[in-house]
Amino acid sequence: MEIEKLLKDNPSFHVWGDGRPANFGVSDKVVKYIISKLKPGFATLETGSGKSTFAFLMAGCKHISIAPDAGEGERIRQYCLANNLNADFSFIAESSAEVLPALMKTIPALDVVFIDGAHRYPYAEIDYHFTEQKLRVGGYMIVDDVHLPSVRNLFVFLKREKNWKLEAVIGKTAFFIKTGEEVLINDWQNQGINSFFLVYSDFKASVIKLIKTVLFMKNRD
Ligand SMILES: C[S@@+](CC[C@H](N)C(=O)[O-])C[C@H]1O[C@@H](n2cnc3c(N)ncnc32)[C@H](O)[C@@H]1O
């Protein structure tokens, strides 16, 4: 099946709280951009599922989707069956926060991670925290809905980190490449997000020291 058919069908894989069908899928542009980053056999993982899942399936990835609604997994498989599409992926019907800590200890390295599960704070950060440890250098960390205040912190953090390169923002979806492993110096000190604070506190300490020295000299006279 061509990706164009899926984009034209635009099926609803999600449901609202009252059970009505819903479609929270990413844009067609994002689906196509994700596909352009994939190769057959890539190990990939997404939090959330839906239209984006097909990018990974069609590219022939070894894919894991994590979303608490088992019905989404079923609807995706049914759509695959109806369209002669490979439905060979792992759907974990649980919350990412529950699953990821243990899962990350058992799976091999990941080539691409797509964060688009729960959007309330701090889910995107939890998803990032556990999956980035498994993402290989050179792999993609894709974060959806970076316009939301509850996701934006992660976007700002990654933009300032030395080991992440922002390749593109398509609509509200950001594509970061992992350029290296995080280098820890003590704890928070080497993180880009803290660099201004470090310079500022060094400066403040120097000014206080200078004032104390001047006062001491004055009192001595
Ligand atoms: C915006 S939709 C994802 C859209 C999907 N990427 C697509 O292109 O169709 C949000 C997804 O997060 C899932 N979700 C909600 N709470 C979650 C949680 N705690 N852990 C993982 N996924 C969650 C929903 O079931 C839904 O699949």
Image (tube, rainbow, N blue to C red):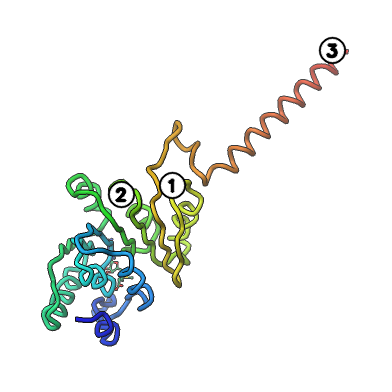
Residue under label 3, please give it.
220
Q: Are marks 3 and 2 in contact (CB under 8 Å)?
A: no
Q: Residues within 10 Å of mark 1 (few under 14, many from 20)?
A: some
Image coords of residue 185 (percent x, y)? 45, 33
In the displayed structure, 184 sits above or below 138; it is above
- Residue under the point 23% across and 61% down: 66
Residue under label 1, please give it.
163
Residue under label 2, please give it.
136
| Amino acid at dot 1 | Asn
| Amino acid at dot 2 | Arg
| Amino acid at dot 3 | Arg
Where residue 55 sits, quadrant-wise, is bottom left
Image coords of residue 189 (percent x, y)? 50, 36
Q: Are marks 1 and 3 in contact (CB under 8 Å)?
A: no
Which residue is the extreme one toward the bottom? Answer: 8
- Residue under the point 42% across and 38% down: 183
Which of 138/72 is in front? 138
Image coords of residue 153 (percent x, y)? 47, 55
Q: Secondary structure at mark 2?
A: strand
